[in-house]
Amino acid sequence: MEFFADTAVIDEIRELNEYGLLDGVTTNPSLVAKAGGDFLETVGEICRIVDGPVSAEVAAIDAEEMIKEGRVLAAIASNVAVKVPLTLPGLKACRVLRAEGAAVNVTLCFSANQALLAAKAGATYISPFIGRLDDINLDGMELIYDIRAIYDNYDFETKILAASIRSANHVSAAALAGADVATMPPAVIRGLVSHPLTDKGLETFIADWQKTGQKIIR
């Protein structure tokens, strides 16, 4: 499974990338607004930090405007994935932009039928929102299983990008369900390494080593 950071905070992206934990980044105008700074400049800087895909979302809702904005975003760097909403205009924009060679992330997916449409439109990524479904008492993870089955039935190449991930449990469940990618806040990525037994074991090892009075580097 690939890990994407869902953020526009440059320092956090750089830190995670240095750990070797990032395969890509997802952004949108809301995340950039929270982080501050110019949208296009921020996307460009992120693209220079990470080698993998950087999803940058259009602001338009009309197909022709989405296409125009998508072309601007795709021109920022070769690793930009244009993000469009899962609407009929968004699917039209997806088809056109994919034909022009741009990667496209179709976002705001909440049903298997929507995911099927996105795949038929040639989407590079489909972004089902797990957490938001959980918020309204629906099983977000069940959607990942359903999309995986449909895509495997017809050999669709669209990658399932599990989004709206809120916890470490979401990450492991999405991996078990067959998601290709999980995009999550940096805090969730960092939290995946944590376990109380790891901490306890490390404390024991350090204490035992100190008792020996030895050094590895002399």
Image: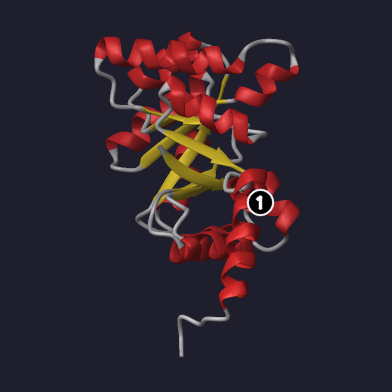
Give the answer, above or below, for where 9 lies relative to 105: below
52 left or right, relative to 203: left
Residue at 40%, 13% in the rendered image: 116
Expressed as whole percent of the image width and height from the top left, the position of residue 201 reads: 60, 52
Residue at 50%, 26% in the rendered image: 174
The N terminus: image quadrant: top left
Expressed as whole percent of the image width and height from the top left, the position of residue 35 reads: 71, 57
Residue at 56%, 18% in the rendered image: 141
Which residue is the site of mark 1? Answer: 200
User: Callout 1: helix, strand or loop?
Assistant: helix
Q: Nearer the viewer, residue 97 or 215?
A: 215
Q: Which of 141 and 63 is in front in this view?
A: 141
Name which quarter of the figure residue 12 lies in.
bottom right
Give the answer, above or below, for where 118 lies relative to 163: above
Expressed as whole percent of the image width and height from the top left, the position of residue 47 reads: 45, 60
Give the answer, above or below, for where 30 lies relative to 145: below
What colour scheme has been applied to the protein in the rendered image? secondary structure
